[in-house]
Image (cartoon, rainbow, N blue to C red):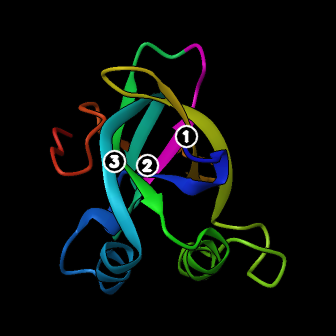
Amino acid sequence: MRKAGSYLFVYGTLLDQENEFSVYLAQNCSFYAKGRFKGALFDAGAYPAAIFLSDSSGYVYGKIFIINTPNEVLKQLDDYEGYGTDQEQPNLFIRKRINIETAKNLIPCWVYLYNLPVDGLLPITSGNYFIKNL
């Protein structure tokens, strides 16, 4: 297995092939597996908002990628996601490493989680941003 910092879990706009950062991701990462984590997904308008809830019965679904150059790629994605001390505070998203379930095992992955209250956001009960059964 690769070192822990090499994996990224993506569940939203970075999977949209028309998004320029999705293209960047495809050029700098390799698909590893489909995955999911316990939590909830919300529609925040132009993007989804995922929160991690270890005691949830629901899941957020997405894909795991192996990052070719983690420091460089994560810096670019931090800027895209509005994460970091140089971004507007509080950050819209935070980057955390959590265990992502695959069909075979758990993989520690970086994931961008929503960092603001979800009150008033519509839940995406499927847990899949591309299947919006609101």
Magenta span contains residue 126: no
Which contiguous range is marked in magenta? Answer: 49-55
Give the quarter of the figure containing the C terminus.
top left
- Between the residue at mark 3 and the residue at mark 2, the CA separation in whole angstroms equals 31 Å
Q: Residues within 10 Å of mark 2 (few under 14, many from 20)?
A: some
Where is residue 28? Give x, y as percent: 41, 76
Q: Looking at the image, which is closer to me, 45 or 126? A: 126
Residue depicted at x 66% and y 57%? 95
23 lies left or right of 17: right
- Residue 103 image position (x, y, % from top left): 30, 22
Q: Which residue is mark 1?
A: 51
Measure the C-alpha gap from mark 1 to mark 2: 12 Å
Residue 45 shows in the view: no
Up-down relation of residue 22 to residue 39 (above or below): below
Residue for badge 2: 121
Give the alpha-carbon distance from disc 1 to disc 3, as whole Å: 22 Å
- Under mark 3, the amino acid is Tyr
> In the rendered structure, which disc, 1 or 3, sits on the residue that comes first in sequence?
3
Nearer to us: label 1 or label 3: 3
